[in-house]
Image: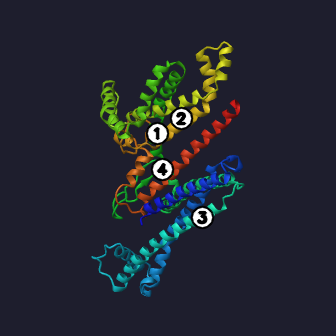
């Protein structure tokens, strides 16, 4: 039985458990729910939880240890000369896995390896059958035991709430531990990179040229890994995008929230938010085929030297792409300002514009700051528009008319194709990712400080 059918079987048992648990509670109530401590649905949820959760926990534990246990059994039967050599053991395990999967006909291996492959296939079959039997048995046992525990005075609601709280704690722990794992994986590879490249050269270097030579005597064989040009390009494009997105998004939010007629708002807001659903590659084409040539041709008329791929073209189009984020989120935040604040301002004789500037905007400032920082994060992480409109050249310049590149574009470029994960060129992508993570973390901490400060003022 495949995993999907096994999960469907457990889900069906949970549904039956819910039904039986609820029906037993109804039967015990004698037709009056007031005779029960909890509602019948709580008794059903209680039996369903005890049916499904132990089975799913068993499945998790099973898959965590099944592979290592079977591998240990296979390795114990291999010849000692194979087990004692890590290289031969890895090659043998790879061959055994291919034979077990039915694709090892082309391999030239010893009879011991062939037997081990067949034994691995048998063990996997037995393990899968045992998993089905044990998992369904645990689910049925949970159903029967929880069903027999149902009594009229049983605190089913309290038990269900405790189970729900435990599930939420586990989910929160998974989210936190996943983040910690990602950070540690970045740190491990970054330290590996710093063992090859001086950290000071990376953090303060003014030249980025990660191409390393194949031959040791080749010119510029060491490459250059200074990250400053990449972050200058990232900040330059982000700044241009924010100069477009923030004022246009805020003013459109203010107009639609405070001045526009309901009929106009009902049409204009969804139309504006459609921009958020347009794929970024479409914006990239728009930037490369329309905006960049327009800037180059008009710049030539004005006597300006505008590159065919420029930070200005990428930043302008990126700002257009981000407008719906700023506008929609700001509109939602301003609409949540209590009506009593508006009424108090109008009662004091303030006009609508004065109310917006002196009351609504300050009250909604924490949410607006969050919306702007979300837009900044979107701009920093955007790749497609930069590749198509700003280029790949890591120029150390703040001139928006020149071609630049960003951190995310270089990370993608470094990890495309077959890469050696022990070379400085590939490992530099992880170092860039870690620094970018720290930068965005700093932005989020700053946003939290702003939100906390102004929330205390208006709560």
Q: Secondary structure at mark 3?
A: helix
Q: Is residue 452 left or right of residue 440?
A: right
Which comes sooner in the sequence, label 2 or label 1? 2
Which comes sooner in the sequence, label 1 or label 3? 3
Q: How many other residues sit within 10 Å of disc 2, few (<14), some (14-19) or many (≥20)?
A: many
Given residues 210 and 70, the one toward you in this image is 70
Which comes sooner in the sequence, label 3 or label 4? 3
Q: Secondary structure at mark 1?
A: helix
Residue 379's disc is 1
- The residue that disc 2 covers is 372
Residue 205's disc is 4
Residues under labels 1 and 3: Cα distance? 55 Å
Residues under labels 4 and 2: Cα distance? 30 Å
Q: How many other residues sit within 10 Å of disc 1, few (<14), some (14-19) or many (≥20)?
A: many
Q: Which image quadrant: the C terminus? A: top right
Q: How many other residues sit within 10 Å of disc 4, few (<14), some (14-19) or many (≥20)?
A: some
Task: Please tell me which residue is depicted at 62% across the width and 40% down the height of the picture.
Answer: 448
Which residue, as the protein is rendered here, is positioned at the far front?
Answer: 30
Count numbered badges in the picture: 4
């Amino acid at each position: 039985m495949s995993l999907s059918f096994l999960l469907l079987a457990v889900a069906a048992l949970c549904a039956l458990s819910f039904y039986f648990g609820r029906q037993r509670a109804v039967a015990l109530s004698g037709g009056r729910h007031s005779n029960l401590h909890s509602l019948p649905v709580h008794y059903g949820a209680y039996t369903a939880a005890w049916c499904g959760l132990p089975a799913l926990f068993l499945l998790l534990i099973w898959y965590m240890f099944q592979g290592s246990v079977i591998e240990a059994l296979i390795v114990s039967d291999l010849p000692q000369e194979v087990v004692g050599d890590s290289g031969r053991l890895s090659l043998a395990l790879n061959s055994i896995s291919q034979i077990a999967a039915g694709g090892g006909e082309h391999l030239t291996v010893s009879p011991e390896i062939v037997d081990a492959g067949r034994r691995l296939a048998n063990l996997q079959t037995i393990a899968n059958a045992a998993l089905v039997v044990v998992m369904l048995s645990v689910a049925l046992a949970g159903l029967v035991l929880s069903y027999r525990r149902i009594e009229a005075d049983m605190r089913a609601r309290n038990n269900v709430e405790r189970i729900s709280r435990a599930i939420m704690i586990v989910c929160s722990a998974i989210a936190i531990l996943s983040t910690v794992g990602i950070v540690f994986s970045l740190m491990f590879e970054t330290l590996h990179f710093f063992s090859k490249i001086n950290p000071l050269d990376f953090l303060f270097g003014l030249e980025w040229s990660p191409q390393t030579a194949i031959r040791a005597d080749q010119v510029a064989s060491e490459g250059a890994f200074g990250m400053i040009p990449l972050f200058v390009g990232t900040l330059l494009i982000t700044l241009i995008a924010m100069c477009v997105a923030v004022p246009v998004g805020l003013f459109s939010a203010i107009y639609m929230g405070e001045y526009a007629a309901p009929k106009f708002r009902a049409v204009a807001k969804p139309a504006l938010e459609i921009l958020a659903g347009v794929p970024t590659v479409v914006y990239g084409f728009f930037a490369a085929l329309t905006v960049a040539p327009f800037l180059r041709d008009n710049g030539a008329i004005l006597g300006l030297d505008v590159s065919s791929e420029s930070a200005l073209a990428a930043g302008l189009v990126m700002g257009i792409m981000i407008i719906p984020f700023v506008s929609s989120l700001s509109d939602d935040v301003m609409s949540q300002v209590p009506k009593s604040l508006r009424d108090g301002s109008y009662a004091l004789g303030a006009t609508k514009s004065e109310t917006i500037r002196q009351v609504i905007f300050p009250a909604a400032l924490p949410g607006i700051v969050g919306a702007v920082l979300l837009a900044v994060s979107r701009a920093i992480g955007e790749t497609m528009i930069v590749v198509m409109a700003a280029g790949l050249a890591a120029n150390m310049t703040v001139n928006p008319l020149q071609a630049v590149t960003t951190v995310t574009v270089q990370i993608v470029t470094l990890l495309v194709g077959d890469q050696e994960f022990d070379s400085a060129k590939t490992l530099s992508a992880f170092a860039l990712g870690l620094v970018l993570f720290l930068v965005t973390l700093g932005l989020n901490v700053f946003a939290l400080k702003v939100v906390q400060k102004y929330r205390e003022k208006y709560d």
